[in-house]
Amino acid sequence: MTTYFIRRILLMIPTFLGSTILIFVILQMAPGGPLERTIQQLQAGAMQQGESVGSVGDIMSGGSSVLPESAMRELRRFYGFDKPVYQRYLIWLGVWPREIKHREVEFSGDTKEVSKNVGRGTYMTLRLDGEQVGVYDKDGLTSDIWKGSIDQEASDDDKVVATIFQTEFSGILTGNLGTSYTYDQPVTEVMAPRFKISMFFGLTGLFLSYIVCIPLGIRKALNHGSAFDFLSSVVVFAAYSIPGYALGMVLLVLLGGGSFWDIFPLGGFRSPTEVWETLTLWGKIKDQVWHMVLPIIAWSISSFAGLTILMKNSLLENISQDYIRTAFAKGLQEKRVIWVHAIRNSIIPIASGIGGVIGVVIAGSYLIEKVFNIDGFGKMGFQAILDRDYPITLGFLVIVVVIRLVSNILSDIALATVDPRIRFK
Amino acid sequence: MSEQQEISLSILKKRWLKFKTLKRGYYSFVLLAILYVLSWFLPLLVNNRALVLSYEGEMYFPVISGYYAGSEFEQDVPGEAIYRELQAAWESEGSDNWIIMPVYPYSPYEDITVAGNKMYDPPSNTHWLGTDNTGRDVFARLCYAFNISISFALVLTVLNYFIGVLIGGSMGYFGGKFDLFFQRIIEIWSSLPMLFVIIIISSIIRPSFFLLIFIYTIVNWIGMTYLMRAEFYREKSKDYVAAALSMGQTNFKVMFKHILPNAMVPIITFFPFAVVGGISALVSLDYLGFGMPPPTPSWGQMLDVGLQNITKAWMVFAPISALFSTLIMVVFIGEAVREAFDPKVYSRLR
């Protein structure tokens, strides 16, 4: 058993690498990436100033009339497009040295040695040595923090363009998800508050759907075929047939002050900060609940139907088992047979689903976040794709992948814990 | 006599008879089938081009032959003739020219550029479900979107099934390294948030109907594959497979002639739910703006516009009711199919 789970955890590694490679390659191959987008923006800016502008294709082939060559190199370096894909992936992962603090140096004519300010009054000496650049500090020793390389593309017969840079290992494995292009903040800082919001919604919705679905499922199973069973089945079917976000829209139109009643706010996680800060504790709670009612209903509806039916079928199946007949035969009370014998067994599939639900908590909610305009985790990921904000997109996907992998294992562990008959091998 | 008949009925026939007794599912099936067949003739039913018109002794068939300029019928409009107005004009003049319009004379594409159309027209006798933000008729768009949604889901499901049976069946049947390799791939695939991957891909290439199906299949084939793998894996160890193999049947024949018919039950019972998944997927992609290219009529796009104009309730309610009633009918069918193919008989408490 333990070996099984250890193997499962080890197998997570190739799966993780496989899925990140897949995501990374798809994103990097995509046209219209951040580099093109920035160039276009710069072009548009130039256009407004009345300068003549070449087409995008022209720019991409290097014939830029707006951006000087060095700026293009700067941009390419900033977005990491000066390296082949596999290196970019390894850098991003954190197992290949990342080049930081670039400084460009130009050797024109016959110059072989250039002194370059690297900040705080420190000068480094760069010496051209055939195809290589040596970096030396003021004592004439080879520097061990600064490295140099020649930019082959930019260099020609007259001049040699070189860069000096420091290297460090920093990537997702070291906890560095990069810096967001759009928010201009470290990705982890952008994510943290939004992750909390989504988590808050997810857990509340999860809790509510469990406390509604389990009793409902039990009641339906015990009264199988009754009028109550039939009527609640209608509700369950209806809930299954309407996507959560669509229900959210109906609720908004009906209760959100659209065309009918104005009871609940149109969206948002809670009142704006200015208002929120002035509220008392009780006021804050009320405000939070007031904002959350509609999204939570929309959120829970997706798991409502599945959970209820699962609970009902599981209990029905158990009730028809022989051990229940035996329990009745030995004269136990019906209450005891159901609540002690049957329920405990039929809760197993529900309990084991708990791990899998965590994944849904995170990734499944962004349609609802979009409808209710909640600044959550899913909406952030979606927006990042639109904005071509690769650090956030990648970080988002990585977190979702990890959560899914972990929750799969958690499900199995939960299943093995609640059901001692189950043995994985 | 009747007993003999019952014995001789094939299992499929029996299941069909059982399905027919489940009224909710059966009627949903009949209704949905009729609607879907009708939806292929929508250009004849819901369209702004006349079916037939007779102008100065000559017959025209604009629905079939396409574009006629307004000047051809002495109508003073730029571009295409507006047959509705032509009809009204000829009728009031009492001229010999006549025109037969489709039952619902609006097209899903004509917007405010066509004279007489208004933005945000509330539901009325002429526009049954009002018009949207560009003056397009909501009901017409709803109907065309129905056809597209169902077709999308059907093609998608069939394609997924094909891949699922092929790969999943081979995984279960051959096992070994092939199985292990695809298991890893499936694990990688299933760890990715698929809607996001589709969005990433669709934001790169502007999808058309079949491209969208292709993209969706790439990310969605694992469900059926896994189901089929389990099914083939179980069936493989049965005696009839060994018997077939010992008679010298090829692997191909064993897989598709012997095992597949025995693995039909999950394939069929899962089908309606896969269709539900397909329809909802298309709606959510369209809602996010990564589905069919505009101006293709689609429920998702209508939801998006509706939510932006929340004070105009018909624009939200129309697509949601259409989506909801379609899905619930498919769910009813699914439930009945499951009941017919895989009945669970629960004993009472005592």
Image (cartoon, rainbow, N blue to C red):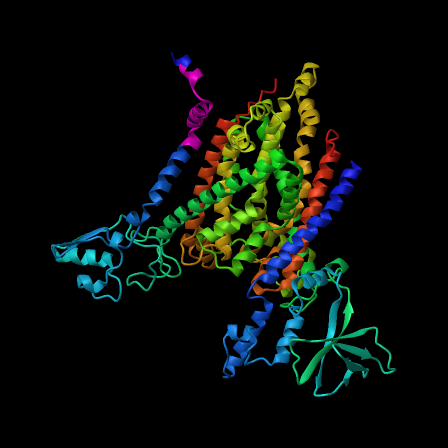
Q: Position of residue A118 (x, y in %)?
A: 78, 80
Relative to A250, residue A179 above or below: below
Q: Is residue B175 at least partly visible in the picture?
A: yes
Q: Name the residue: 38% across, 34% down.
A: B30
Q: Position of residue B176 (x, y in %)?
A: 66, 37
User: Residue A333's image quarter?
Assistant: top right
Q: Name the residue: 24% across, 66% down.
A: B77
Please give the range of residues in magenta. Answer: B5-26
Q: Name the residue: 79% across, 78% down.
A: A134
Q: Position of residue A423 (x, y in %)?
A: 74, 32
Magenta portion: prevailing SS class = helix
Q: Residue furthest top?
A: B1
Q: Is residue A207 at least partly visible in the picture?
A: no
Q: Residue furthest front?
A: B248
Along the line of sight, which residue is nearer the eye, B209 or B115?
A: B209
Q: Position of residue A346 (x, y in %)?
A: 66, 30
